[in-house]
Image: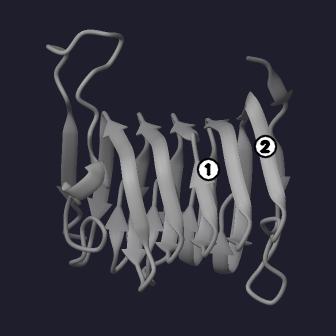
Amino acid sequence: RSTLFPYTTLFRSSYSNEAQPFKGTFDGCNHTIKGVRVHKEDYDSGLFGNSHGTIKNVILDGAIIYGLSNRGGICGANGGTIENCIVSNSSIINDYYWAAGGLVGTNKGTLSNNLVINTTVGYAYGVGVIIGGKEEGSDLSNNYYYNCTLNVERSGIGAPSGDLPQNNGAMPAPIIDGDIDDPVSFTVQKDNQ
């Protein structure tokens, strides 16, 4: 594994948006993208803002994603396919509006074989470690999280209201480093300010 972008990068907006969603195939070839910073006071924030394509084999590490609505590490709003991706050591932050997720803000596509680890997600009506909100057509399988924190001001934890155990849609990682006895940590914090 190598690092595609070794330096901190600041984007005023994500690649793609609702009017011009990403429609191709992005294969990260298991490379790591480090230190991405997205600050967008608008909708659809993430490495990709809005996708109707395929994003696969991407490792996003140490990202800070900020926006008003639909924030996710890999994609703000997904209507395509995201598979075999990892988001680690990241913060997904929004400013009170809808859908913040460690992997995807709002999903109406397919998410499979993804992992979110050591990541904090917070402040939205719909907040979840894998996705913040799901729409019709959302298909999740084999997505896991480990040692993540949700900072929740309003109701709507999960996708949008908890783990999705069917097909391991959003579940705590059962095995880390090959040891089934490793503790799975998941913390929900409420901010009363």
Nearer-the-camera pick, 101 or 114: 114
Q: Is residue 40 above or below residue 8?
A: below
Task: Determine the residue positioned at 37% across, 45% down.
Answer: 142
135 horizontally vs 25: left or right:
left
In percent of width and height, residue 189 lies at 20, 54
Q: Nearer the viewer, mark 1 or mark 2?
A: 2
**Distance Cα–Cα, label 1 vs label 2:** 22 Å
32 horizontally vs 71: left or right:
right
**Given the image, on which type of amino acid does mark 1 rest?**
Ile
Answer whether residue 126 is visible to the viewer in this image. yes
Q: Secondary structure at mark 2?
A: strand
In percent of width and height, residue 69 lies at 54, 80
Q: Quadrant of residue 181?
A: top left
Q: Quadrant of the N terminus?
A: top right
Q: Quadrant of the C terminus?
A: bottom left
Task: Provide the residue designation for mark 1.
Answer: 64
**Given the image, on which type of amino acid does mark 2 rest?**
Asp
Q: Is residue 103 above or below residue 9?
A: below
Looking at this rendering, what residue extends furthest in the front direction?
A: 167
Task: Provide the residue designation for mark 2.
Answer: 27
Q: Is residue 153 above or below residue 25?
A: below
Circle 2 packing at 10 Å, graded few (<14), some (14-19), many (20+), is some
Task: Determine the residue positioned at 54% across, 71% down.
Answer: 109
Looking at the image, is mark 1 or mark 2 earlier in the sequence? 2
Task: Determine the residue positioned at 32% across, 19% down.
Answer: 176
15 horizontally vs 148: left or right:
right
Task: Determine the residue positioned at 40% across, 77% down.
Answer: 134
